[in-house]
Amino acid sequence: MYKTIVIHTRSTYWSNPESNDESVVDADDLAQEIAQHSNKLEEEGYKLVQITPVSSGNLENGNGYFHTESVILTAKRID
């Protein structure tokens, strides 16, 4: 049996939040959430098997941005 958890990243905007200008993912916060959820999965009898990043962004006239919008944790139940 598998279990998945989605963790949405928090971003910091350096200039214009409406246009998502200079969006930066808070990596420290994301790492803490991954550790917290990974430990909880282990306590529930699961083993983390994969962390998949989900990217999001916008491209217009050759300019744009992409950032990690979220990560998906996939864990397998240990029998």
Image: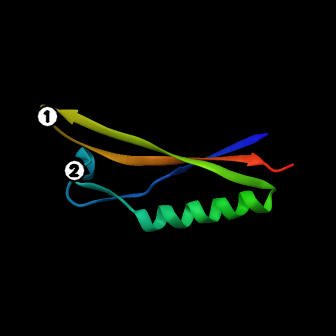
Residue lying farthest to the left in this orientation: 61
For disc 1, the neighbor class at 10 Å (few under 14, some 14 to 19, many from 20) is few
* 33 lies left or right of 40: left
* 20 lies left or right of 68: left
Residue lying farthest to the top in this orientation: 61
Q: Which residue is mark 2?
A: 21
Query: What's the residue at 50%, 64% (across, down)?
Result: 31
Residue 14, compared with residue 17, is above or below; it is below
Residue 56, compared with residue 22, is above or below; it is above
Q: Tell me how many marks there are.
A: 2
Q: How is the image coloured?
A: rainbow
Q: CA distance from mark 1 to mark 2?
A: 15 Å
Where disc 1 sits, the SS reads loop
Where disc 2 sits, the SS reads loop
Which quadrant: the N terminus?
Answer: top right
Front one among 44 and 24: 44
Query: What's the residue at 22%, 34% (across, down)?
Result: 59
Front one among 28 and 74: 74
Residue 62, compared with residue 35, is above or below; it is above
Where on the picture, by quarter, is residue 22? bottom left
* Amino acid type of the residue that numbered disc 2 sits on in the rendered structure: Asp
* Amino acid type of the residue that numbered disc 1 sits on in the rendered structure: Gly
Sequence order check, earlier mark of 1 and 2? 2
Q: Which residue is mark 1?
A: 62
Q: Nearer the viewer, mark 1 or mark 2?
A: 1
**Image coords of residue 46 (percent x, y):** 76, 53
Residue lying farthest to the right in this orientation: 79
